[in-house]
Amino acid sequence: MGSILRMRTFPGRFESLVSISDFVTQAAEDAGLDKRAIHAVQLAVDEACSNIIQHAYGGEGRGDIECTCRIDGAGLTVILRDEGCRFDPAAVPEPDASPTLDTCSGGGLGLFFMRQLMDEVHFEFDQGDGNVLTMSKYREGSFADA
C-alpha cells in the first residue's frame, strides 16, 4: 500500500478543535486503527493543537494550524505545522511521577501525554516552516510494531 496524504489548514482557534478532531478521526479510521488507537490519536492531536493555540500563538486567532495526515501500511502519521513561537521540547522539564493536588500546577503534562499516547513523537523547527510536530500511531500487528 502506498501512502495517502490529506492536508487541511484550520484557524488557530479553540472552536477549530472539533473540526481538527473530525479530520484526524476519519484518517485514523481509514488507516485501520482500532477504537483505542483512534481515541489516543484524538487526545494527542487535541492536546497538541491546544498547546499551539495557547503557547505557540499566545492565544486564539493569531495563526493557522496546518494538519497533514499520512496513511500507509503501518498506520497513521499526523503532522502539525504552526508559525508561532519556537518550541523546544528539551526545555520542558520531565513531569513529576507522582503529582498531588498540592504540587500539580494544572499544566505541563501535555508533552508527556502525547508521548504516552502515540508510538512516535518528533518536534522540529525551521525558519521557513515554523514548528513541525510529527506523531505516528501504528496499527496493531503492523511491521512498525515489531
Image (spheres, helix red, strand yellow):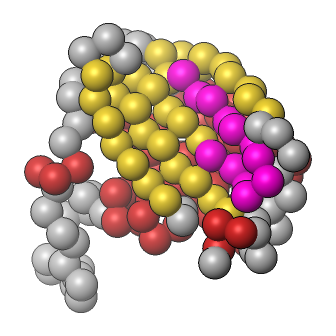
The residue that appears at 21% across and 29% down in the rendered structure is 86
Q: Is residue 65 above or below residue 21?
A: above
- Please report the residue visible at 47 percent of the width from the left and 16 percent of the height from the top: 64
The part of the image, by quadrant, that contains residue 97 is bottom left
Q: Is residue 84 visible?
A: no
Q: How many marks?
A: 0
Residue at the spot 59% in from the left edge and 35% down from the top edge? 17
Q: Residue 18: x and y, percent?
A: 67, 37
Residue 78 lies, with reference to residue 138, above or below; the image says above
The stretch drawn in magenta includes residue 34? no
Q: Is residue 72 magenta?
A: yes
Report x, y in % for residue 35.
80, 67
**Magenta highlight: main SS:** strand
Where residue 85 appears, as percent x and y from the top left, is: 22, 24
Residue ID at (44%, 54%): 121
Asked if residue 124 is positioned above or below residue 9 in the image, the reply reads: below
Of the 4 image quadrants, the one containing the C terminus is bottom right
Task: Please identify the quarter of the rendering in which residue 67 is found.
Answer: top right
The reply to whether residue 122 is in sight is: yes
Residue in front for this viewpoint, 28 or 109: 28
What segment is highlighted magenta in the picture? 66-77
The residue at the far bottom in this view is 98
Which x, y percent locates residue 103?
14, 77
Q: Nearer the viewer, residue 112 or 72?
A: 72
Residue in front for this viewpoint, 99 or 84:
84
Q: Is 93 placed above or below 57 here?
A: below
